[in-house]
């Protein structure tokens, strides 16, 4: 009973936007700082396996998530149900499209169009780098990443942010378990953090932004100084 009440509250909580002065709250507004011409750039540049990091301005849940960004997703590229052997229970959850993202929100792990994911205030796209992994076979690796992602499709959201148990997954947990074979090379490490009144070893979206990744895109709303500040912070911690 307590878990149901808590999870329902957090789901509602994440859609509330706060304005500091004059102080008031607005539920689920529809205006975003990342505009259409930037989304077109993203759509033209995305490659399967890219990690998508986004954030919102003034949403209430953002005040309780450490760091600048508040959400992470994994770009899958084109998806086709006919090419896959999916359990019947997952077929209804599988999203077919030309450019698809998989991520986890309060509703659980699901797939949607990349354009929908890009409707936000801050956006960064990260890609594995040949400089960091000169001998990597990125295409072969992605096949494994893709299968891991589909195995987690339909799982519930992890409101406890417990990285030791992947029965349910938060957004950063999903990206982490799909890419765990190589994330350590990109200096992405679990860190002790206090989230929602408890302390755990986990990842927040900012933790993926390191100097080892190639930054394919950053929205104008983020700014180069902000990106460098996050990279410097992660470099100090990992060093």
Image: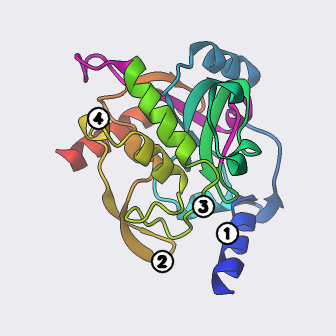
Residue at point 71%, 65% (across, down): 11
Could you give the CA–CA distance between mark 3 and mark 1, rounded to whole angstroms?
11 Å
Between discs 2 and 4, the one toward the N terminus: 4
Quarter of the figure with the N terminus: bottom right
Q: Which residue is mark 3?
A: 157
Q: Position of residue 201 (x, y in %)?
A: 34, 64
Secondary structure found at label 2: loop
CB within 8 Å, label 1 to label 2 = no
Is residue 168 among the parts visible in the rendering? yes
**Residue at coordinates 47% horizontally, 47% vertically from top-left?**
205
**Residue mark closest to the camera, 2 vs 4:** 4
Between marks 1 and 2 in the image, the one whose residue lies nearer the viewer: 1
Cα–Cα gap, marks 3 and 2: 18 Å
Q: Is residue 125 magenta?
A: yes
First in sequence, mark 3 or 1: give its number: 1
Give the residues drawn in magenta, as a range: 110-138
The answer to which of 35 and 138 lies nearer the viewer is 138
Residue 138, image x, y percentages: 37, 20
Residue topped by disc 4: 186
Mark before the other along the chain sequence, 3 or 2? 3
Q: Quadrant of residue 92?
A: top right
Residue marked by disc 1 = 10
């Amino acid at each position: 009973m307590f878990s149901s009440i808590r999870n329902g509250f957090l789901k509602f909580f994440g859609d509330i936007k706060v304005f500091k002065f004059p102080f008031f709250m607005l539920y689920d507004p529809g205006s975003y700082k990342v505009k259409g011409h930037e989304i077109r750039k993203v759509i033209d540049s995305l490659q399967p396996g890219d990690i998508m990091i986004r954030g919102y301005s003034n949403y209430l849940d953002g005040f309780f998530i450490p760091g600048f960004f508040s959400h992470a997703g994994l770009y899958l590229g084109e998806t086709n149900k006919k090419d896959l052997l999916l359990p019947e229970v997952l077929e209804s959850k599988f999203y077919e499209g030309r450019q698809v993202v998989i991520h986890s929100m309060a509703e659980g792990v699901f797939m949607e169009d990349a354009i929908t994911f890009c409707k936000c205030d801050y956006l960064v796209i990260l890609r594995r780098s040949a400089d960091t992994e000169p001998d990597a076979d990125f295409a072969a690796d992605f096949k494994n990443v893709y299968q891991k992602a589909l195995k987690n499709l339909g799982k519930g959201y992890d409101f406890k942010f417990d990285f030791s148990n992947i029965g349910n997954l938060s957004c950063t947990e999903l990206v982490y378990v799909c890419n765990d074979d190589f994330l350590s090379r990109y200096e992405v490490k679990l860190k002790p953090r206090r989230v929602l009144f408890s302390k755990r070893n986990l990842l927040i979206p900012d933790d993926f932004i390191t100097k080892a990744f190639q930054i394919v895109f950053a929205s104008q709303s983020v700014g180069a100084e902000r990106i460098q500040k996050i990279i410097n912070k992660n470099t100090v911690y990992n060093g």
